[in-house]
Structures are given as C-alpha cells and as structure tokens.
Amino acid sequence: MATTKKKAVRRARKGQRIRQVAAIPYRLREDGSPEVLLVTSRTTRRFIVPKGWPMKGKSGRKAATIEAQEEAGVLGKALKQPAGTYSYWKRMTNGFIRVDVAVYLLQVTEELADWQEAANRQRAWLPAADAALLIDEPELSTLLRDLTVPAADPA
C-alpha cells in the first residue's frame, strides 16, 4: 500500500485529484435504527471512519472492507455501490493534499476483540446523528446525518 500512497502523493503534487475508499460500519439496534462505528485517527485522535488508499487488484468495496477490519476490527458485508463521496484535505509531512473519498456502507457481522490497529485506535458505536456531530469533514458529517441503511432481512 505504501507504493500506492507514494504514487497518489506524486499525482497530487501535479495537481491531480487523488482517491481513497472508506467504510461506514453499521449495525441495526433492536428498534431498527442504525448505529455507526467511528474510530480515532492515529495522529490527531479525531473521530473518523476507516479509510485508506485503493488497493491494486481489489475493488473499492473490497478495499473499504479490508480497511474496516484493519482500523476498526470489524468484519461484514459492504454494499456494492458507494453510499456517497466526500472530499477532505489530508495532512502530509510537507503540506496538505485534496482527497476524494468513495464511502461504502458495511453491515457488521462480527466485532473482533483484537485487531491489527487496536493499540493505536479507539472505537465507538453511536447513533448516526451523534456520529455526524463528531466528524470534522462537513461532507462526511452530512452523509452520516442523512444516512439510510437497508432494512434488516426478516428472521
């Protein structure tokens, strides 16, 4: 993944827009309302959704699923189509670059007690509207605030 990041940074320096993928892990409460999982970033400790660089040979949906497992310790099924997109300014060592993010809903089927980035991140399950208040990126906040998830399959 480091190679992909380096290529993305080079493209950004040439003025090209770069892309990332993200997951909004969610589960349904007993009343049918969704809760979403936020994680803290490693550096600023702000609440974010799991996200990362596209992965060679993997769809955006698959890459978002992998990021959710690595950063938030959850497994699940991502919807085929993105739930939306947002843009943000990514902090790099020598400045900022503009990044466009495709966001996939991920219905969580399992929450791991131990995962790859557990020592570096905290996670929190919140109603979508509350999660929207904690997110600094305005477009992502709006996406969370207006979130609609598929209805649960009848048991």
Image: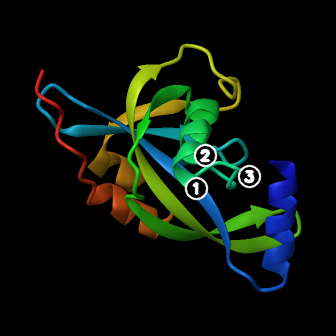
Q: Which residue is mark 2?
A: 63
Quarter location, residue 84: bottom left
Drawn side of residue 63 relative to residue 61, left or right: right
Please tell me whether mark 1 or mark 3 is closer to you in this view. Answer: 3
Drawn side of residue 73 relative to residue 119, left or right: left
Mark with earlier residue (2, 1) = 1
Residue at the location (85% across, 50% down)?
2
Tags 2 and 1 touching, CB below 8 Å: yes
In space, the residues marked 1 and 3 are separated at their CA atoms by 13 Å
Label 1, residues with CA under 10 Å away: few <14, some 14-19, many ≥20: many
Spot occupied by residue 9 in the image (x, y as percentages of width and height): 83, 68
Spot occupied by residue 47 in the image (x, y as percentages of width and height): 53, 46
* Type of the residue with mark 1: Val
Q: Which residue is mark 1?
A: 21
* Type of the residue with mark 2: Ala
Q: Which residue is mark 3?
A: 56
In space, the residues marked 2 and 1 are separated at their CA atoms by 7 Å
Mark with earlier residue (2, 3) = 3
When the figure is inspected, residue 140 is found, relative to residue 42, above or below; the finding is: below
Residue at the location (73% across, 46% down)?
43
Spot occupied by residue 130 in the image (x, y as percentages of width and height): 31, 47
